[in-house]
Image (tube, grey):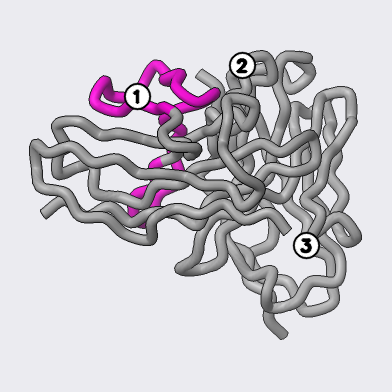
Amino acid sequence: QVQLQESGPGLVKPSQTLSLTCTVSGDSIGSGDYYWSWIRQPPGKGLEWIGYIYSSGSAYYSPSLKSRLTLSVDTSKNQFSLKLRSVTAADTAVYYCARGYLRYFDFLGYWGRGTLVSVSS
Amino acid sequence: QTVVTQEPSLTVSPGGTVTLTCASSTGAVTTTYYPNWFQQKPGQAPRALIYNTNKKHSWTPARFSGSLLGGKAALTLSGVQPEDEADYYCLLYYGAAQVVFGGGTKLTVL
């Protein structure tokens, strides 16, 4: 059973970079069958897709975040990561990582528990 | 900007049937949008229910089903249980760099 766990600072100052890592267990991130996603949810609001990355390193970003966002994957550590630059209070949210199954258009079958990141000075 | 629209809230009686819908600002939803549905209870991460329009995960209760209805994606709950009270989100695929969530439907079982 695949499990995902987000980790990173819970507090980031405005204009700085938000960095999160998702550690995958029970599955190899290097498998070509899957893609690895980030989603966020501001407090009391709905879900927002951030982007996803394949084990090859090919990444696709939400148009609204593309200019500030970098996704990466480290197959040796079985982890993938998110970096969001120049954050503001609007980036305060619970951030989730998830696994999708490419072949079946199962975009987000398995989710991590999420981690709250607050942007504040 | 593409917008995916869901009913903000619905109420259903225990044992009843309810259909949640998911509409696209670009027009009719078809199977090529590969609709996915998720359930989220307070304080929990979302849980995937349906993928690729009508495929169920191994953990999806039989009373949940996905379909296309009147140009929209639909999630039908038959024989609703009290534990089905939750927020439900749909997701539509518009291409490699555009995956959009609906605003969510708050389902009340009353």
The amino acid type, in three-letter code, at marker 1 is: Thr
Q: Label 2, label 1: how many angstroms apart (C-alpha)?
A: 16 Å
Identify which residue is drawn at 87% across, 49% down.
A70
Of B69 and B8, nearer the camera is B69
Indicate the position of residue A58 as horizontal and vertical percent values. Answer: 89, 31
**Label 2 in the same subunit as label 1:** no
> Could you tell me which secondary element the residue under label 1 belongs to?
loop
Q: Residues within 10 Å of mark 2 (few under 14, many from 20)?
A: few
The amino acid type, in three-letter code, at marker 2 is: Tyr
The answer to whether any part of residue A6 appears in the image is: no
Which residue is disc 3 drawn over? A18
Q: Quadrant of the C terminus of chain A?
A: bottom right
Give the chain letter at badge 3: A
Q: Is residue A72 above or below residue B55?
A: below
The amino acid type, in three-letter code, at marker 3 is: Leu
Indicate the position of residue B92 as horizontal and vertical percent values. Answer: 60, 39
What numbered label is drawn on residue B60? 1
Identify which residue is drawn at 25% across, 34% down.
B77
Q: Is residue A25 above or below residue A82?
A: above
**The quarter of the displayed image where residue A57 is located:** top right
> Could you tell me which secondary element the residue under label 2 belongs to?
helix
Q: Label 3, label 1: how many angstroms apart (C-alpha)?
A: 34 Å
Q: Earlier in the sequence, mark 3 or mark 2?
A: 3
**The quarter of the displayed image where residue B63 is located:** top left
Which residue is disc 2 drawn over? A104
* For residue B87, side relative to residue A73 (left or right): left
Q: Is residue A20 above or below residue B35?
A: below
Query: Would you say residue B54 sits in the magenta stretch?
Result: yes
Of B51 and A71, nearer the camera is B51
Span of residues in magenta: B39-67
Q: Is residue A22 above or below residue B62?
A: below
**Label 3 in the same subunit as label 1:** no
